[in-house]
Image (cartoon, grey):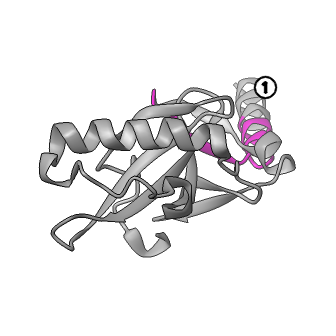
Amino acid sequence: MKKTFNFFALLSIAILTGCGNKLVMNNMLPEEVDIRPLMAKGYSPVYCNGAITALINKKPYAFNAKDEVVLKQSLLKWLNKNKPEWAQIEQDLVVTKHTQYQYSYIILYDPVDVYKTEIIGADGKMIKLFIRYDGTKIMTPYDVIDWSTCSDNSNK
């Protein structure tokens, strides 16, 4: 009996000690993902209600002229579908100048960066749209949701 107790006590200590070396956040499955390798690549954790719910990429991707075409086409497609009265945005509107990095989250195992585009429509009202970048390509379409899992918006 005493040996069984010692075994479980040692096992518990080993498990608790091992957990102390991890920094984890849930992906969208939800599974825990160790974010230490991402931190070594320049990401830092964002805490919400005591848990890591997002990451900040210290060097987010900077959209270029090629991306401008994709962003503008995606924006026009979203406007035509959801706000047709706004679909006649200025032809010289540079979408990348209105698009800012917000945060990153993990869908499976790799970070996805979320960007916010703010534009003013023909009626003078501002609209905020969100789009994602997965490290290789822009993930269209735009959406009005920001994919945040934090109910406390103090970090936004």
Residues rendered magenta in the picture: 12-29
**Disc 1 marks which residue?**
3
Q: Nearer the viewer, residue 154 or 20?
A: 154
Q: In the image as oriented, which residue stretches furthest toward the front?
A: 91
Q: Quick one: which residue is furthest to the right in this view?
A: 40
Secondary element at tag 1? helix
Percent x, y of residue 26: 53, 39
Q: What's the residue type where badge 1 is placed?
A: Lys
17 in magenta: yes
**Quadrant (top left/top right/bottom left/bottom right) for the N terminus:** top right
76 and 112: which is toward the camera: 76
Say which of 72 and 29 sits in front: 72
Which of the 4 quarters of the picture holds residue 133? Answer: top right
Residue 8 picture location, percent across and down: 71, 30
Q: At x 56% / y 26%, what residue is drawn?
A: 108
Picture residue at 16% right of the left edge, 43% below the top? 82
| Residue 7 appearing in the image | yes
> Does 117 lie within the magenta span?
no
The residue depicted at 75 percent of the width and 60 percent of the height is 58
Up-down: is 101 above or below 33?
A: below
Question: Residue 116, located in which quarter of the rendered image?
Answer: bottom left
Q: Is residue 17 visible?
A: no
Question: Which of 22/77 is in front?
Answer: 77
Q: Give the number of callouts.
A: 1
Residue appearing at x 77%, y 43% in the figure: 38
Q: Residues within 10 Å of mark 1 (few under 14, many from 20)?
A: few
Residue 48: where, in percent of width, then height?
A: 48, 63
Please determine whether, in this image, residue 133 is positioned above or below residue 127: above
| Lateral position of residue 50 relative to residue 12, left or right | left
